[in-house]
Image: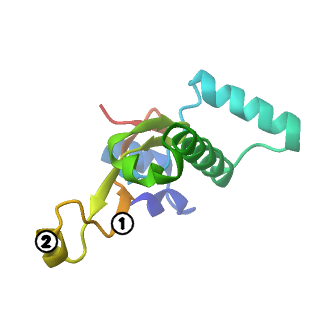
């Protein structure tokens, strides 16, 4: 569970010995040039280091803005066929049907879209990194 990382009482050596793996919707690779540029521009603009919400806000606005520009006002119909790598991970939308009887009548019917991408991170060398 990713909440384990918030525990202040645990020693990171335990995570190393346990070969800890966690799932997370958010992971930023500090070695990615796009991430470094974003951090630098954010700091120059706001005088602070960007937090998780800054990355999410940037990624959401950029992704949906591009989709709107490319597909127009019906861009939501294209989200599930347009995955995209973003700074904090990936947008990989899939259709979710909550009422199967309606889907039987109309194969294009769906109730919502859900980003199904999740990072699997391993704790190695005393920090989290993507698992192989």
Task: Read off the residue under disc 2.
Answer: 105
- Which element type, helix, strand or loop, lies under badge 2? helix
Up the image or down, 13 lies above or below 53; here it is: above
Q: What residue sits right under mark 1 in the picture?
A: 112
Quadrant containing the N terminus is: bottom left
Q: Report the front residue among 117 and 13.
A: 117
Furthest residue toward top: 33
- Residue 92 image offset from top left, x and y in percent: 37, 45
User: For the residue carrying disc 2, how many other residues have a C-alpha within 10 Å: few (<14), some (14-19), or many (20+)?
Assistant: few
Could you tell whether 54 is left or right of 124 in the image? right
Instruction: Relative to 1, say whether 69 is above or below.
Output: above
Nearer-N-terminus badge (1/2): 2
Q: Position of residue 74 (x, y in %)?
A: 46, 53
Q: Are marks 1 and 2 in contact (CB under 8 Å)?
A: no
Which of the pair 128/74 is nearer the observer?
74
Q: Which mark is residue 28?
A: none
Q: Secondary structure at mark 1?
A: strand
Residue 118 appears in the picture as rendered: no
Q: Position of residue 48 (x, y in %)?
A: 83, 44
Q: Residue at point 45% right, 32% down?
A: 125
């Amino acid at each position: 569970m990713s909440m384990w990382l918030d525990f202040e009482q645990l020693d990171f050596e335990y995570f190393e010995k346990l070969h800890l793996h966690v799932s997370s919707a958010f992971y930023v690779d500090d070695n990615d040039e796009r991430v470094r540029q974003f951090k630098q521009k954010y700091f120059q603009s706001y005088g602070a280091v960007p937090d998780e919400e800054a990355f999410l806000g940037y990624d959401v606005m950029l992704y949906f803005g591009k989709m709107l520009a490319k597909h127009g006002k019906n861009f939501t119909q294209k989200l599930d066929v347009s995955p995209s790598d973003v700074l904090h991970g990936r947008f990989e939308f899939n259709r979710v049907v909550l009422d199967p009887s309606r889907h039987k009548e109309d194969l294009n019917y769906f109730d919502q879209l859900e980003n199904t991408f999740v990072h699997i991170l391993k704790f190695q060398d005393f920090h989290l990194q993507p698992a192989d």
